[in-house]
Image (cartoon, rainbow, N blue to C red):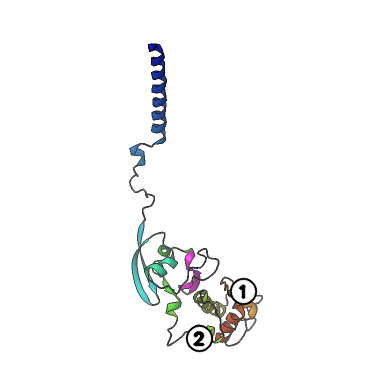
């Protein structure tokens, strides 16, 4: 009887010892979990200072380095005219002009553009004094729901500037031809801006109007 009890106790002790050994192996030591000097701890944001000129106003901010330029504009500067559509650079709703060139603001980090000059839809005109492209979109009914319109207008202004600089597109056959502006050129250059309502023909008319009707 005593021998049987000793055997059972031994088996129980072995099971407990095995469980404790497995647990010890699965849990890293306290020293191993401590970050080394200068290491980035998961979940703890890394902050960085950035200075930008947005619509003529200088802004100095301290941001999480993961903050996109789109989120900086919308969440930190409260310039909500620039829209977040797909957040993958596929729809063009977030198009702004950075140092004179149009970009998708959802695809770039704010800290990458320290010292840059940015223009958003809010910086183009006012209700009392519209930018010519804004007025043309109204005149030609170049929008329906309006969600993509800020990006469309910023992109359209940049398109005309690209054409003035003789920057070719994929459908440009000869840069010496005049007028370079054509329906095909406008459609190709605006192809990165999606209008879910389908107001494309009116958008082309608005751009052509601002360009002097050349298209």
Tell me if residue 198 is in the magenta stretch: no
Q: Nearer the viewer, residue 213 or 79?
A: 79
Which segment did they paint magenta? 83-106
The spot of residue 131 in percent (x, y) is: 47, 84
In primary-sequence order, the first of circles 1 and 2 is 2
- Residue 135's label in the rendered image is 2
Q: How far across and how far down the image is residue 12, in percent? A: 40, 22
Q: Secondary structure at mark 2?
A: helix
Residue in front for this viewpoint, 180 or 19: 19
Residue at x-position 37% and y-position 68%: 76
Of the pair 39 and 87, the residue shown nearer to us? 87
Judging from the image, what secondary structure is the residue with disc 1 in?
A: helix
10 Å crowding of disc 1: few (<14), some (14-19), many (20+):
some
Q: Which residue is mark 1?
A: 188
Q: Position of residue 65 (x, y in %)?
A: 39, 59
Q: Is residue 136 above or below residue 148?
A: below
Q: Which mark is residue 116?
A: none
> Which residue is at a point 41% across and 14% down the rendered structure image?
4
Q: Quadrant of the C terminus?
A: bottom right
Q: Nearer the viewer, residue 170 or 123?
A: 123
What is the CA distance from the residue labelled 1 to the residue labelled 2? Answer: 23 Å
Residue 160 in percent (x, y) is at 55, 80
- Could you classify mark 2 by the number of other residues whose Cα lies within 10 Å: few (under 14), some (14-19), or many (20 or more)? some
């Amino acid at each position: 009887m005593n021998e049987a009890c000793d055997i059972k106790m031994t088996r129980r002790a072995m099971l407990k010892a095995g469980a404790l050994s497995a647990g010890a192996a699965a849990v890293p030591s306290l020293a191993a979990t401590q970050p080394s000097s200068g290491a980035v701890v998961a979940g703890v944001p890394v902050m960085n200072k950035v200075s930008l000129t947005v619509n003529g106003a200088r802004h100095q901010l301290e941001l999480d380095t993961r903050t996109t330029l789109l989120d900086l504009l919308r969440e930190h500067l409260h310039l909500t005219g620039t829209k977040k559509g797909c957040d993958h650079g596929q729809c063009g709703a977030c198009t702004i002009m950075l140092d004179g060139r149009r970009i998708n603001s959802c695809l770039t980090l704010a800290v990458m553009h320290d010292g840059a000059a940015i223009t958003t839809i809010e910086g183009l005109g006012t209700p009392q004094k519209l930018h010519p492209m804004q007025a043309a979109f109204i005149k030609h009914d170049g929008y329906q729901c309006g969600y993509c319109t800020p990006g469309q207008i910023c992109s359209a202004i940049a398109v005309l500037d690209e054409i003035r600089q003789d920057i070719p597109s994929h459908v440009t056959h000869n840069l010496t031809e005049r007028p370079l502006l054509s329906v095909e050129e406008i459609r190709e250059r605006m192809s990165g801006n999606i209008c879910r309502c389908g107001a494309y023909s009116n958008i082309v008319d608005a751009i052509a109007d601002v360009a002097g009707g050349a298209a």
